[in-house]
Image: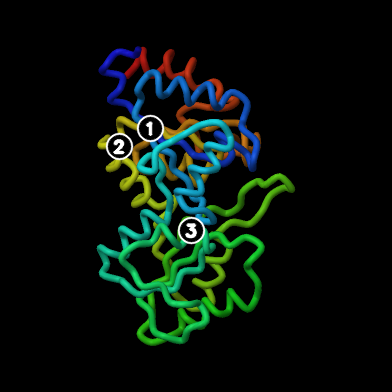
Amino acid sequence: MLDSKVCHNSLLIDLDGVIYQGDRLVDGSLESLDWLKRCQIPHLYVTNTTSRSRAALLEKFIGLGFEAQLEEVMTPIVAANQWLHTQQMYKIAAFVTPSAICDFSGVEIVSSECDEAVDAIVIGDLGDAWDYQLLNRAFRLLMQEPRPQLVALGMTRYWRSQDGLRLDVAPFIKALEHAASCEACVVGKPAAAFFAASLALLHRTAEQAYMIGDDIVGDIDAAQACGIRGIQVRTGKFRETDLSGKIKPFAVLDSIADLPAWWEQVVVDNP
């Protein structure tokens, strides 16, 4: 068991590219997650995944061999739902997968085929479902009067699937912003509000947190801009050229399998 003072430190953990890649676990990830639980280190799984609900993510975890509680998973839809309520926006058009719709609560979701005025248009990752007609539908809704708010469930540029790199949400948001002359409110990574909401769930300050991720921009740079120390792993979408730019992670690990040894050397010795 770690010294009690160390448990003031906490960990935000990206999922895809850190713990698993597609439907395959990163080697050593289960052992590291078991270590986290044994040491009672507060942690939260933070993901920009918007193609699955939190419940569906938990089912995937079980299928891969590890478990988590619903409250241990922070997704952009959870953050968006909170934000919509604070802004009193209760009527939305949601461009997300049917699986993820259930994580919205207390809002009216109109069909994307509907011409009704809405308060906000929420855009997530639709993968192969994106086509010209669907993107143009989102554009037409944005051009209604009064103009609705464009809400981005993250601004991740791309991700690595089993068949290679794939576009994520950001390119579609940028296209809509340009066409409709508007600016999206971002509620997923790399938005500061997403990290603030995650820290609030852990009851920790930025100085007490570390972020481990594979995205040098969306995970590491975004977290460090909020005062959270970033741990870059060489798995997932990572490329060696990522380390030659201006973004300097607090630490670089070959994978999450190296986390326990690094944590006990660096964080325990220097809490």
Residue 98 location in percent, x, y? 52, 63
Above or below, comparing residue 144 to residue 260 in the picture: below
The disc at residue 128 is: none
Residue 164 location in percent, x, y? 72, 47
What's the residue type where badge 1 is placed?
His
x 30%, y 37%: residue = 202
Query: What SS does tag 1 mark?
Result: strand
CB under 8 Å between discs 1 and 3: no
What's the residue type where badge 3 is placed?
Ala
Which residue is disc 3 drawn over?
Answer: 100
Near mark 3 (Cα within 10 A), the count class, few <14, some 14-19 or many ≥20, is many
Near mark 2 (Cα within 10 A), the count class, few <14, some 14-19 or many ≥20, is some
Picture colour scheme: rainbow
Residue 39 location in percent, x, y? 37, 18
What's the residue type where badge 2 is placed?
Leu
Image quadrant where residue 205 sits: top left
Which residue is disc 1 drawn over?
Answer: 43
CB under 8 Å between discs 2 and 1: yes
Q: Give the CA distance from mark 3 to mark 2.
A: 23 Å
Above or below, comparing residue 269 to residue 254 in the picture: above
The disc at residue 202 is: 2
x 59%, y 75%: residue = 134
Mark 3 vs 2, N-terminal side: 3
